Image: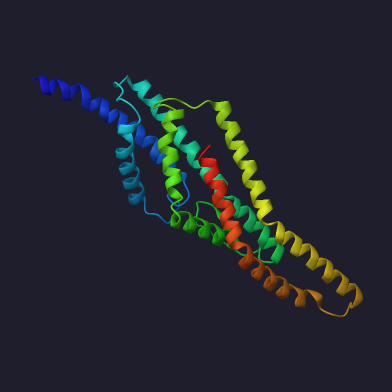
């Protein structure tokens, strides 16, 4: 009889805690790079979310008593909001490579080629390729552990069932968006300089020799020079993006 009463008290509280943790983890994994990409089957995402929730739930504190229906709904909304914010920060900072890919494509003359990227949005071919390289490098060096650790450590800042402060969250997302665009522009700066110098040279040649088909000669040369510059700068581009990714999640 005593065991039955103990289970009736403890088991609902444990399941309620697991439900809240699962809501935060699933919302974060839905947006994290690699975990939230369209190529990953939905069943694998669900299993990964459930396994992580089972591991994290005992670490978030004691089990909470089960409240009424409206309190449960409010706690679920709070957990989804926290998880979505963490996933959004990671997704936004990794999207800097898409910004740089768009600029690089315009600089070397391949911006009109589009394809479906590795994420939920479409991007130019170069942006999709660079993002795929960043995601592959992220998992190769174990950087996805940083994101998972950030989700686990978020309970120190946002306790279970607590809604984040709207003003602070909005400011953090805005700062991350600005940092992502700034990083994308900085990474594409060598290609902007290449396009500027190349167009100045082509303009001078066209002025001196009007009969020469400058565009037909210059476009393949610009593409070839751009591809060589991509090969030279790709390690730095991916390294700086992953460094910014880790810095945002460790804040």
When the figure is inspected, residue 158 is found, relative to residue 236, above or below; the finding is above
Q: Report the front residue among 161 and 187.
A: 187
The picture quadrant where one finds residue 212 is bottom right
**Image-based side of 21 in relation to 105, left or right:** left
Residue 127 position within the rendered picture, expressed as x and y whole percent measured from the top left = 59, 58
> Extreme bottom residue here?
211
Q: Report the front residue among 72 and 130.
A: 130
- How is this picture coloured? rainbow
Tell me the residue at 79%/62% (across/down). 196
**Image-based side of 36 in relation to 17, left or right:** right
Residue 109 position within the rendered picture, expressed as x and y whole percent measured from the top left = 69, 66
Residue 249 position within the rendered picture, expressed as x and y whole percent measured from the top left = 51, 41
Residue 114 position within the rendered picture, expressed as x and y whole percent measured from the top left = 59, 62
Tell me the residue at 41%/26% (across/down). 159
**Image-based side of 212 in relation to 29, left or right:** right
**Image-based side of 171 in relation to 48, left or right:** right
On-image quarter of the N terminus: top left
Q: Report the front residue among 165 and 119.
A: 165
């Amino acid at each position: 009889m005593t065991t039955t009463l103990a289970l009736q008290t403890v088991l609902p509280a444990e399941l309620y805690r697991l439900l809240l943790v699962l809501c935060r983890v699933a919302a974060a994994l839905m947006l994290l790079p690699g975990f939230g990409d369209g190529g990953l089957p939905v069943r694998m995402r669900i299993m990964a979310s459930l396994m992580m929730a089972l591991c994290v739930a005992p670490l978030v504190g004691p089990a909470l008593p089960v409240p009424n229906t409206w309190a449960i709904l409010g706690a679920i909304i709070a957990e989804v909001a926290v998880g979505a914010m963490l996933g959004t920060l990671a997704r936004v900072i990794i999207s800097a490579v898409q910004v740089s890919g768009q600029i690089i494509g315009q600089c070397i003359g391949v911006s009109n080629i589009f394809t479906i990227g590795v994420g939920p949005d479409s991007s130019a071919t170069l942006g999709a390729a660079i993002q795929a390289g960043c995601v592959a490098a992220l998992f190769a060096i174990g950087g996805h552990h940083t994101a998972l650790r950030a989700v686990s450590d978020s309970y120190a800042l946002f306790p279970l069932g607590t809604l984040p402060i709207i003003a602070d969250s909005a400011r953090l997302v805005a700062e991350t968006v600005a940092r992502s665009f700034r990083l994308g522009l900085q990474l594409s700066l060598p290609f902007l300089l290449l396009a500027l110098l190349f167009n100045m040279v082509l303009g001078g040649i066209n002025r001196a020799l009007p009969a020469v088909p400058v565009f037909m000669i210059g476009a393949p040369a610009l593409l070839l020079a751009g591809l060589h510059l991509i090969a030279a700068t790709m390690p730095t581009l991916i390294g700086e993006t992953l460094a910014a990714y880790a810095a945002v999640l460790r804040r």
